[in-house]
Image (cartoon, rainbow, N blue to C red):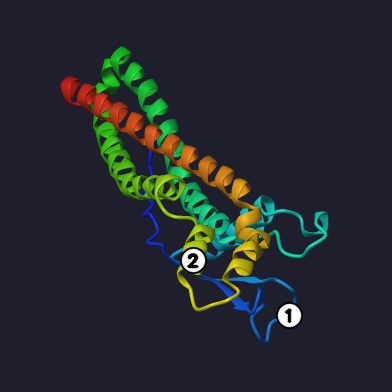
Amino acid sequence: MRVPLVAEPQVAFSMVHHVRAEGQKFVQTTNTTGYNQEHIFAFVTGLEIRHIGQLLVNLGSRWQDVPRDHLITGVGITPRLFVATVLSQCGSIASPNIVRTTRALQNCDKQLLIARSESSKYEVVFHRLSQTLIAMNRQVTGSRPMIDFLAETADALVHELTPFEQYIKVRLMEWEENPHRKDLQDALHQLDISKEQRRDSDKMFKVREGLRQDNASINALQQRIDINYGLVSYFN
């Protein structure tokens, strides 16, 4: 039984969310088409092409609202929703490792029972199981830092970091020399970051809970690996 060691990707992610105000309202940036008043510039490196495709085609298109369901253009991807999408995609890369390790441990349990009942295979099977468990331990250990970081990031986005619309409100309050700041505060409610705040919060909460579950699964797997390795070492 062979457990492949899959290295977790080193993902770098940066994003800029840009809005432009003219007079009493927010407007689209110059030299752009459409009527969107918000623009996102994002860079993601470290993912394979297939993972980028899943990120943009599957998660992004499934989570954002359908444009034809709205009279006003926009209501699509927002900064918070895009971050949730990236975190979810990174978590899904580690999930197959958890599934593979779980199945491998189930196979280990079966082989332990066989080895105990068939003394002729005892030494060979236990030696092979020992090597397999070491490989599984490396794989789980490699996945743990990534899942921990993703879960902590999602938790911070849910509870700690200030939403961008609140940041803009504060900056507008400080912009005392602008006579239109009150109008801009009112116009802020028409931007997607304000209108879709509830949807984005629900998606981020869903991502966080999924990552927490993955984290709990990894801890449980680590305990099972340690127990099995202890049994193999004791009887070997």
Quadrant of the image occupied by residue 181: bottom right
Calculate the distance from the C-alpha at mark 2 to the C-alpha at mark 1.
30 Å
- In the image, is 181 to the left or to the right of 100? right
Crowdedness near tag 2: few (<14), some (14–19) or many (≥20) residues, C-alpha within 10 Å: few
Q: Residue at x 31, y 26 (%)?
A: 224
Numbered badge on residue 177: none
Q: Residue at x 51, y 65 (%)?
A: 168
Q: Quadrant of the C terminus?
A: top left
- Between 58 and 79, the one lying in front of the other is 79
Quadrant of the image occupied by residue 115: top left
- Between 47 and 106, the one lying in front of the other is 47
Q: Can residue 77 be seen?
A: no
Q: Estimate the x, y position of residue 119 in percent, counting from the top left.
A: 26, 16
- Residue at mark 2: 173
- Residue at mark 1: 33
Q: Estimate the x, y position of residue 45 in percent, counting from the top left.
A: 45, 68
Quadrant of the image occupied by residue 34: bottom right
- Between 68 and 220, the one lying in front of the other is 68
Q: Estimate the x, y position of residue 170 in percent, counting from the top left.
A: 47, 63
- In the image, is 75 to the left or to the right of 107? right
Q: Can residue 89 be seen?
A: yes
